Amino acid sequence: MEKKILFTVENWKGDIVDIYGPTKEKLHSGKVIKVQSSLEHDIMHERRTLLSLAKTDREVKEIMRDTNWKIRVLNEQRLNEEINTLRRSQRIKDQTTTKKRFARSVKFVE
């Protein structure tokens, strides 16, 4: 199955990073965004660049809507990754605590 590219981000090094989906985030949602990762900061840089080139209020609204959606998608992916990491670590912890190890005695024959 081929993953769908939702959008691309140019990072601070100038490399193009593809962001793959799926996502539950809607484009026209008014949720609050959190800018925490470096890719999210790169999107904010892209936003500032595009806003400086915007000529009408409609263009400004579209830029704000699109960049907010991109950041919400990255927030969602980061949250899902954190949840999966916690689940993996809990599963590993459960596996190691349920196994009891007993010392074995070794007899040497002369």
Image (cartoon, rainbow, N blue to C red):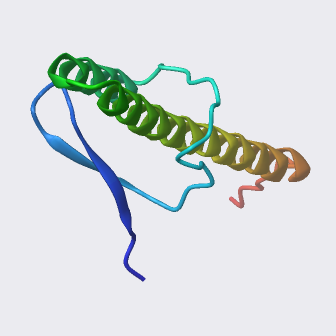
Question: Where is residue 98 shown, x and y percent of the image?
Answer: 90, 51
Q: In which quarter of the image is the C terminus?
A: bottom right
Q: Is residue 14 left or right of residue 45?
A: left
On the picture, is 67 further left or further right than 106? left
* Residue 29, image quadrant: top right
> What's the residue at 54%, 44% (across, down)?
77
Residue appearing at x 29%, y 24% in the figure: 47
Which residue lies at the image location 47% right of the left edge and 31% below the top edge?
A: 68
15 versus 22 height, above or below: above
Which one is in front, 47 or 80? Answer: 47
Residue 5, position as x, y percentages in the image: 34, 62
Quadrant assignment, res 4:
bottom left
The quarter of the rendered structure image containing the N terminus is bottom left
**Extreme residue in the bottom direction:** 1
Residue under the image location 55 percent in, 35 percent down: 75
* Tally of numbered tags: 0
Taking 36 as reference, is 33 left or right? right
- Residue 2 figure quarter: bottom left
Q: Nearer the viewer, residue 65 or 80?
A: 65
Residue 63 location (% of width, % of height): 34, 32
User: Where is residue 54 shown, x and y percent of the image?
Assistant: 21, 25
